Structure formats: structure tokens, C-alpha cells
Image (cartoon, helix red, strand yellow):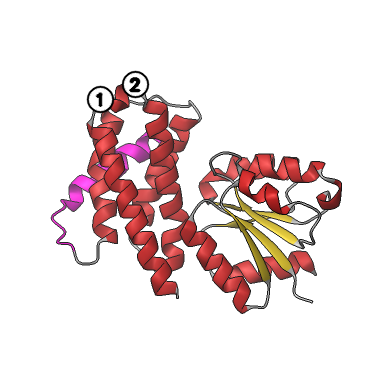
Amino acid sequence: MIEKIKEGFISETLDELNSLEVDLSTEVIANESDIVIEKVFTAVHKIKGTAPMLGIDGLNMIAHSMEQVYGALRDGNISLTHEIVFNTIKLIPALKAELSINSVNNLDSEDVSKSIRYFDSLIS
Amino acid sequence: MAKTVLIVDDSESIREVVNFTLQNEGYEVLVGVDGEDALQYLDGRNIDIIITDLHMPNLDGLGLIRKVREIDTYKHIPILFLTTESQAAKKMEAKQAGATGWIIKPFVPAKLLSAISRVLR
């Protein structure tokens, strides 16, 4: 039963992350940034709260960092910048790689760490 | 008689995990996908405890807690909310809205069951 729930969660989350990549890579962000901020926050909030319960580890550090930044954006404590979007676009494939059991992981882990450090610096 | 739990969360996976965990322990479970959806169950039926996420579309957890506290039948029903530790500020807001307590996500089933039985004791 839990395996079936896990499969559903992975499939649903990958779809959400794919959709976010499209949103963040297009002009939509310029006009509808509030909608995209909410979508990113909701996606990483769900990942952070659900993935460990299903035995999916390795996502928490990235999800926590993104949740903090997008929570601050949502609350108006910081403003959306191209640098935040750029680093988000770099972190989403890292989340997808952790979820995709069969995928080949070509990510540069130093690049991912840099983006996490950048996000953490916005909150500290 | 089995206790009835109303679970409210927009994450299908969380709903399924919680539902599975509680039904295995003999609870009756009602499920709402957001605060608005959960209100349909507050029609006078017997519900022993509500467990709600905070961040949800349409009507969020805080809005749901406030609405529940306005309904005479459910004015004193225990309400636990699910939260991640980065939402610490929300805890106080939820308590002021009328929440009984909280459970930090992610949680293991044993922690959820222990929180429920403690509140229902």
C-alpha cells in the first residue's frame, strides 16, 4: 500500500516540477510571479512534508532551503529576482533526480550546493 | 465505538498515508482536500477530532479552524494542525485561531497515533 502511495507521490511531484520548469523558463514569470511563487512554495512544502514519510530521502535539504526562500517571497519579506529564478531552475533538476530512481544523475553537486548556499544566505 | 477523525490536506499522498494509518488502528476516517471541502462534513455528524494542514488552496487551515470554532456543535472539538518546522510563526496564529496542538511534518505513523490518543484521552 505504501509503495503504491509512494509511486503516486513521485509521479504527481515530477509532473508539478516539470510544470514549474516551464513556468520559470518563460515570460510568464514577469507577469504572474505571485502565481509562480505560490506554485513553487506549494510544491516544495509538499515534498518536505511528504517525501520522508514515504522513505524518500535526499530531498529535504533542497526542499527546506527553497521553502524558506519562497515562504519569504510569499510573505513579501524579500522580492523575486532573476538570481532567485536562476538558482531555482538549477535546483529543480536536483529534486527530480532524487525522485527519479531510474534516471541518470548528471548534476554537478557543487553547483547544487552553491544554489542552496545562495538561498540560505537570503534567509539568514 | 470507533472514533471518527476528519483529515484535511491538499496532498493526496499525505491523505492516503494518514487514512491508511488511522484505518489500520480502527479509526473511522473522513477526508477533505482543503478547508472548503472539509466544511461539508461539519453538518452535525459525530466527529471526534480534526487534523488539518495549514497551507491549502481555497480555504486554508487557519480559515478552517476559525470557521469550526464558530459552529456550536464543533466549538470544543480537538483540532490538530500539521506544519513544517519552518512555519513556526504560524503555530501561535493557529493556537490563537483555536487549534488544540500541532504535529510537525514529516511524521512517523506512531507519532501521529500518539498525538491523537493523547488529545482524545
Residue A119 appears in the rendering:
yes
Q: Is residue A38 magenta?
A: no
Residue B110 appears in the rendering:
no
Q: Is residue A117 magenta?
A: yes
- Relative to B11, residue B1 above or below: below
Location of mark 1 (residue)? A27
Image quarter (top left, top right, bottom left or bottom right) of the N terminus of chain B: bottom right
* Residue range of the region highlighted in magenta in the rendering: A103-124
Q: Alpha-carbon distance for marks 2 and 1? A: 7 Å
Q: Position of residue A104 (x, y in %)?
A: 14, 61
**Total labels drawn:** 2
Image position of A43 (left or right of B34): left
- Residue closest to the eye, A66 or B73: B73
Q: Position of residue A42 (x, y in %)?
A: 44, 44
Per the picture, the main secondary structure of the magenta-coloured stretch is helix
Q: Residues within 10 Å of mark 1 (few under 14, many from 20)?
A: few
Q: Which labelled disc corresponds to residue A31?
A: 2
Instruction: Report in which chain the residue with disc 1 lies.
Output: A
Q: Position of residue A15 (x, y in %)?
A: 31, 51
Image position of A29 (left or right of B1): left
User: Of all residues shown, which one is farthest toward the top?
Assistant: A31
Query: Hey, what amino acid is under mark 1?
Result: Glu
- Residue closest to the eye, B6 or B88: B6
- Relative to A79, residue A113 above or below: below
Residue at left offset 20%, top offset 66%: A102
- Residue closest to the eye, B31 or A52: B31
Question: Mark 2 touching mark 1, by CB under 8 A?
Answer: yes
Q: Position of residue B20 (x, y in %)?
A: 55, 72
Residue at left offset 34%, top offset 21%: A31
Instruction: Report in which chain the residue with disc 2 lies.
Output: A
